[in-house]
Structures are given as C-alpha cells and as structure tokens.
Image (tube, helix red, strand yellow):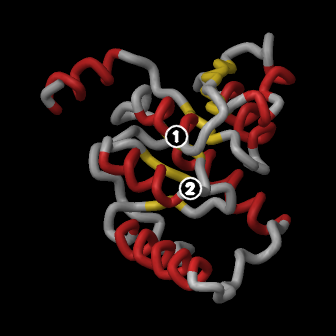
Amino acid sequence: MPLILEVIISSIRQRHVFVDADACPVIDVTIRISTTRGFPVVLAGNETQNLERFVGLEDVILLKTPVGRDSADFAMVSKVSVQDIVITDDIGLASIVLARGARVLNSRGIEYNTATIDFKLLLRHKSQKIRRSGGRTKGPAAYSIEDKDRFINTLKNILKSPQKRGTKANTKKER
C-alpha cells in the first residue's frame, strides 16, 4: 500500500498502544495508564504469556499468536500504523515498527528513535556473535523502581502528545 494512502487510512483509525507481552514487566501499568486516557491496548503474545487473565478488560485486545520465534512480533508489525505506540524490549521489533512510523518505548521508559536504532542493532549483533563463539556478555541491569517510574512518565507524555511522522528522539536517557 502506498505510504500516503497508509497515512490517510491510519489517521482515521484510533491510536493504539501495542504491547509485546513476552516477559514484559509493564503490562498492567500500560493497561491502566492507556485505557484511562482512552487508548485501546493490544497485547500480542502466545499462550505461554498467560494473556487470558486480561480477557474481559475494557479496551484491551488480545492478539494471540502461535508459539514460535518472533510470531508475536510479525503479527504486531502487520497491525501497527503510523499513529500507534509500541512497548517492547526487542530491538529488532523496535527497528521494524520505527520504520513504519510508530513510536517505540521500552519497559525502562527509553524511547527508541531512528537516529540510534541501527547502532543498537549493531551492538546486539556483536553480543550475539560473542555468545555464539562461547564468550560471555553483560546482561541488562536489574529492573528498578526508577525504570518503572521513567516508563510511566514517558508513556504519559507520549500519550499526551500528538503523533508526528518521524518522531523526535528521547535523547536525554537513551543509551
């Protein structure tokens, strides 16, 4: 579909908050913040994520996928449009939905952007190469209260702002 037509169609559809539910520590808070502000939440995952606990919640849509590597990611990508927000810690998925014009936030409250995503993909690739050759790499720091607070504040700010194509970076905290 041509980009101009996609932008016109997506401007008619309501903005959604998509959550990559795989090991996501902020599902509950995302639902609470988003739905109280009138934004539907789409939870993408397979049966191993126990998404059934969210059945019946108002403005929560379950996007169930088969068990399989990246199946939830691919299902989400096909539904995301320009005005949407995606919550994920998956750099690969972030890269794809950024290219579609969506805003992307990780569970630590860091907004990904097109200026730095290629470097993050390179770092991920280098770490994978080290691990495949038997080496060890440092994992992420433990999830903290500060991370959750940053996530809450960033999500609230994104939901308040109008969606713009080619969003600005949240460079203050991006690592």
Q: CA distance from mark 1 to mark 2?
A: 9 Å
Q: Which residue is mark 1?
A: 73
- Dot 1 or dot 2: first in sequence order is 1
Which residue is drawn at the image coordinates 32% and 42% (left, top)?
Answer: 100
Instruction: Return the residue found at the far front.
Output: 133
Q: Looking at numbered disc 1 in the image, what kind of residue is underneath it?
A: Asp
Residue 55: which quarter of the image? top right
Position of residue 24 relative to residue 38, above or below, is: below
Could you tell me which residue is drawn at 47 percent across and 65 percent down? Answer: 170
Q: In x, y percent, where is residue 141?
A: 76, 77
Say whether residue 49 is left or right of residue 79: right
> Are circles 1 and 2 on residues that touch, CB within 8 Å?
yes
Q: Is residue 55 left or right of residue 102?
A: right
Q: Quadrant of the N terminus?
A: top left
Point out which mark residue 90 bears: 2
Label 2: how many Cα within 10 Å (few below 14, some 14–19, many 20+): some
The quadrant where residue 121 appears: bottom left
Which is more toward the observer, 105 or 124?
A: 124
Q: Residue furthest bottom?
A: 135
Q: Amino acid at mark 2?
A: Asp
Q: Dot 1: what SS?
A: helix
Residue 143 spot, x, y in % from top left: 80, 66
Measured as percent of width and height from the top left, residue 35 is found at 68, 25
In this rendering, the answer to whether 13 lies above or below 33 is: above
